[in-house]
C-alpha cells in the first residue's frame, strides 16, 4: 500500500466517524420525549395596601394669631389742677392694681368747696327747722280762728306750707352741691380703673392739668385677646362662647429664643369681617392670666403666636396617609376581585401627614399606598401578604389645618 493510498484511507475513516456521530446525535434529538407544558399564571402588579375603617376623629385647627389687649383706655383727668404726686409705677411697663392711686392733683380748692357746701347744708337744715316751727305756730293760729271761707291755696299759704316746702328744696339743693364737691375732691386722686399695665404716660409732678388732659394709656392685665385668621370653611368646626356653653378650647404658643410661652385660651366670638386679604375669616380668643405667675415669661402684646384650636370631632371619617392621595382628590382602591379602582373622595380635613375622608370610600376597603407606574382602571393587582386590618377605636392624632 502506497503512502498516498494510506492517506486517503485515513480521511475516509475520519469522515465516516463524523457522519456516524452526526447520525447518532440526530437520532437522539428526534427520539427525545417532549416535556409536559404548563400555562404560566397571569400575575398582577405588586402593591402595598391598607384596610380602612371609619371613626370619630378629634382634630385641631392650627393657625397664626396676634395678641391684642382685651381692655385698653386712655386715662384722662376729670378736673383741673396741679399735679402734686405721681406714683413711681407710672412709667411704661408699670403695673397697678384696681383702685390703686396713680396721680394726685392739688386738692385744696376742692376741700374748700366741700367745707363751703357743708356749711350751706347746715344752714339749710337750720332754716328748715325754723320754718317747721313757724308752720306749727301758723297752724295753731289758724285753728284758733275756727272755720273760715277761704280757698285751699290761701289756707296752705296761711299755714306756711309753701315756705316749708321751699326750705326742704333748699336743703336738697345744698346736699346735692355738697355731694358734687365731695365727688370732685375724690377725683383729685386718679386711680387705676382695673388691674392694668402702663403703655405710655404724659404727666409729671408740677404739671398743670386741665379737664380731659391725657394722663396715661393703660391696658388690662387680667386677660388678653388673640385675633386669629382661619379658613372660612373651618368656622363650622369652631364653637364660640355663648351664655349657655363655653367656647372651643385653644392653646397659645409663643417662642422666645429657646424658651416657649404657652397659655390656655377660649374662643369667645367670630368677628364680622374678613381679614385684610379678604380670604380668611377671623375669630377672637380670650386668654386668662396672660402674664403668668411670678417668674414666668409674660405674653407680650403684639406678639405673633401659634394657635391650636380644639375643633369639633369629625364623625364617620377615614384617616388616610397623604401618600394614598393621588392628584389631590383621587384614591386607588384594590377591590374584592383584586382589580384597581380609581375613586374621587371628599376631603374634610388635612393634616401634616394624613387626610380625613368623609365620602368616596367604604369601611374595610383596601387602599393602595404604594406607587403604580401606569395606573389603569381594572388592572390586576396583588399583594405580598395579607392586607393589614384597621384597629377599631384607633385614637386620632391632632390635625393641622382645615381645608380652605
Image (spheres, helix red, strand yellow):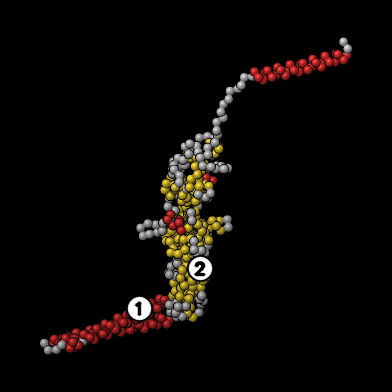
Task: Measuring from the top left, give residue 111's x and y in whole percent.
Answer: 40, 80
Say which mark, if any, is on residue 94. Answer: 2
Q: Nearer the viewer, residue 275 or 81?
A: 275
Q: Residue at x 32, y 80 (%)?
A: 175
Task: Measuring from the top left, give residue 263's x and y in whole percent.
Answer: 48, 57
Mark closer to the chain start, 2 or 1 = 2
Residue 117 is left or right of residue 318, and the answer is left
In this picture, is 109 found above or below 23?
Answer: below
Residue 110 appears in which quarter of the rendering? bottom left
Residue ID for mark 1: 179
Task: Measuring from the top left, give residue 201's x and y in whole percent.
Answer: 51, 73
Q: Nearer the viewer, residue 192 or 348?
A: 348
Residue 178 appears in which quarter of the rendering? bottom left
Marker count (numbered): 2
Residue 99 is left or right of residue 381, and the answer is left
Q: Residue at x 42, y 46 (%)?
A: 316
Amino acid at each position: 500500500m502506497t503512502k498516498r493510498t494510506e492517506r486517503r484511507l485515513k480521511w475516509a475513516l475520519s469522515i465516516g466517524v463524523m457522519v456516524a456521530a452526526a447520525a447518532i446525535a440526530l437520532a437522539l434529538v428526534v427520539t427525545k420525549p417532549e416535556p409536559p407544558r404548563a400555562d404560566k399564571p397571569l400575575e398582577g402588579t405588586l402593591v402595598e395596601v391598607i384596610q380602612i375603617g371609619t371613626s370619630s376623629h378629634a382634630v385641631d385647627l392650627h393657625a397664626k394669631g396676634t395678641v391684642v389687649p382685651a381692655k385698653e383706655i386712655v386715662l384722662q383727668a376729670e378736673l383741673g389742677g396741679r399735679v402734686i404726686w405721681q406714683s413711681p409705677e407710672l412709667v411704661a411697663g408699670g403695673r397697678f392694681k384696681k383702685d390703686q392711686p396713680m396721680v394726685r392733683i392739688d386738692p385744696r380748692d376742692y376741700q374748700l368747696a366741700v367745707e363751703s357746701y357743708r356749711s350751706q347744708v347746715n344752714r339749710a337744715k337750720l332754716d328748715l327747722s325754723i320754718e317747721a316751727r313757724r308752720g306749727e305756730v301758723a297752724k295753731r293760729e289758724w285753728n284758733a280762728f275756727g272755720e273760715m271761707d277761704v280757698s285751699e291755696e290761701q289756707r296752705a299759704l296761711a299755714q306756711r306750707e309753701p315756705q316749708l316746702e321751699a326750705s326742704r328744696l333748699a336743703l336738697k339743693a345744698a346736699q346735692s352741691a355738697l355731694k358734687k364737691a365731695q365727688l370732685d375732691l375724690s377725683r383729685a386722686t386718679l386711680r387705676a380703673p382695673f388691674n392694668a399695665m402702663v403703655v405710655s404716660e404724659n404727666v409729671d409732678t408740677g404739671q398743670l392739668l386741665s379737664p380731659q388732659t391725657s394722663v396715661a394709656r393703660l391696658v388690662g392685665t387680667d386677660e388678653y385677646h388673640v385675633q386669629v385668621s382661619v379658613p372660612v370653611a373651618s368656622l363650622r368646626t369652631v364653637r364660640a362662647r355663648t351664655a349657655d356653653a363655653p367656647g372651643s378650647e385653644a392653646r397659645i404658643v409663643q417662642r422666645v429664643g429657646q424658651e416657649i410661652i404657652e397659655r390656655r385660651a377660649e374662643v369667645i366670638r367670630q368677628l364680622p369681617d374678613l381679614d385684610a386679604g379678604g380670604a380668611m375669616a377671623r375669630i377672637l380668643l380670650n386668654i386668662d392670666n396672660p402674664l403668668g405667675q411670678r417668674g414666668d415669661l409674660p405674653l407680650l402684646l403684639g406678639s405673633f403666636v401659634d394657635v391650636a384650636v380644639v375643633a369639633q370631632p369629625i364623625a364617620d371619617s377615614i384617616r388616610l396617609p397623604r401618600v394614598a392621595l393621588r392628584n389631590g382628590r383621587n384614591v386607588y382602591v384594590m377591590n374584592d376581585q383584586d382589580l384597581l379602582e380609581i375613586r374621587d373622595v371628599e376631603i374634610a380635613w388635612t393634616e401634616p401627614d394624613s387626610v380625613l375622608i368623609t365620602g368616596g370610600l367604604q369601611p374595610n376597603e383596601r387602599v393602595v399606598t404604594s406607587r403604580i407606574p401606569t395606573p389603569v382602571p381594572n388592572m390586576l393587582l396583588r399583594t405580598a401578604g395579607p392586607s393589614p386590618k384597621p384597629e377599631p377605636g384607633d385614637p386620632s392624632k391632632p390635625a393641622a389645618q382645615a381645608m380652605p
